[in-house]
Image (tube, rainbow, N blue to C red):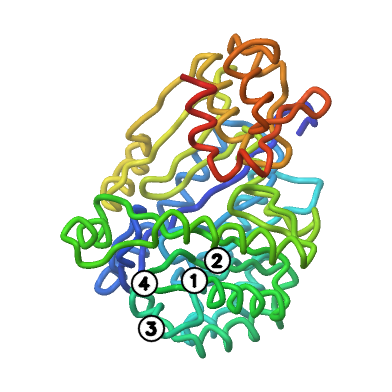
Amino acid sequence: MTDALPGVALYVHWPYCARICPYCDFNVVRARGREAEADALADALLADLDAQAARLGPRPLVSIFFGGGTPSLMPPGRVAEVIARARDLFPATDPVEVTLEANPTDAEADRFAAFAAAGVTRLSLGVQSLDDAALAFLGRNHSGEEARRAVALAGRHFDRLSIDLIYARPGQTVDDWRAELLWALDSGFEHVSPYQLTIEPETAFGRAVRRGVWSPPDEALAADLYDATQSILGQAGFEAYEVSNHARDPAARSQHNLHVWRAGDYLGLGPGAHGRLTLDGQRTATVAHRRVADYVAGVASGSPWSEVTSLSAPEADEEAVLLGLRTVEGVALPRLERLGLSVDTAPLGDLLADGFLVRTGDRIVATPKGRPVLDGVLKALLT
């Protein structure tokens, strides 16, 4: 192994869920009745990992992230196999962050000790809400009390804990949201990911909103909820180091996500998993087959990816700008200059003058004014 080789992160997609949440547009399937298929998928993940390691060579492992889907439905023994294989194939000298997303049901919480023993170092709990009516609306299969029990149990087994919460729900008030955030802080979470409920067109929520069954909060209330989020977490000493991610201190930041936002290499394993790899000296985007059966068959035939796209240098730079401006680190000015952007001319100069972006040394960073409208800032900057 040589330090000159770029580190690689590993994303593992486990697509199975006990139920499909009505807001979810991820690549997921119902778990019931798919036990044999899931076992075959676990075997395929290991085979894919072996094959990709042979392709990439001996790069140092940066992090592992089990996402989904519901990775806490994955047998802990299988999680252990993936972690051990990854560590063998990509030896690392630095500590490796291993994150697993989990739902806070009693059944899954019973596995927390086994996941910790398997090598998971960081647990990300998808609590979403503590209100039972809100949880029912969101299609979650846990109660507020179950979430509280799961949080207490997780604290016994993991030093690094993150919580996901959804806001801008119909009927939610700023006071309701403040109470949930304060509970998360009182519960000892060092990392909070508050997500505004977004209505994706092809989801059950998207169809319901089109039919007029219900409507999301108006823009003014959504803005108030966003402002409350920044204020409450900021007063508690949390930094919004990325648009939807707040950490108590730099050590609490998700190292895996930072690696991705910094345009590092990451290998995507599992159905529909995306990856970004340096192959033959070129930034390459990969997408695995979405259907479980197609992915398993693809791994067996040596073709796990349904899409492989070599990015041009400008395309790679543009993608790095899209990711980097989401973070407090921002983007290196030379990368923007390679895209023909200058601090002295529009559009970059205008965005700086209007206070949406700021120059800090040789980096360009989104300001508190620019973050809430970042999509518009990026559109102005890159089109």
Contact check, label 1 and label 4, Cβ < 8 Å: yes
In primary-sequence order, the first of circles 1 and 4 is: 1
Q: Secondary structure at mark 2?
A: strand
Give the Cα separation between the discs numbered 1 and 4: 8 Å
In primary-sequence order, the first of circles 3 and 4 is: 3
Contact check, label 3 and label 1, Cβ < 8 Å: no
Q: Which label was assigned to residue 128?
A: 1
Place of residue 344 in the rendered image (x, y in percent of width and height, measured from the top left) = 70, 11
Residue highlighted by disc 3: 133
Give the Cα separation between the discs numbered 4 and 2: 13 Å
Q: Secondary structure at mark 4?
A: loop
Place of residue 248 in the rendered image (x, y in percent of width and height, measured from the top left) = 77, 62
Crowding near pointer 1: few (<14 within 10 Å), some, many (20+)?
many
In primary-sequence order, the first of circles 3 and 1 is: 1
Contact check, label 1 and label 2, Cβ < 8 Å: yes
Judged by depth in the image, the label closer to the viewer, 3 or 4, is 3
Judged by depth in the image, the label closer to the viewer, 2 or 3, is 3
Query: Residue 235 versus residue 241: which sits nearer the camera?
Result: 235
Query: Residue 309 versus residue 221: which sits nearer the camera?
Result: 221
Query: Residue 56 versus residue 126: which sits nearer the camera?
Result: 126
Q: Which label was assigned to residue 138?
A: 4
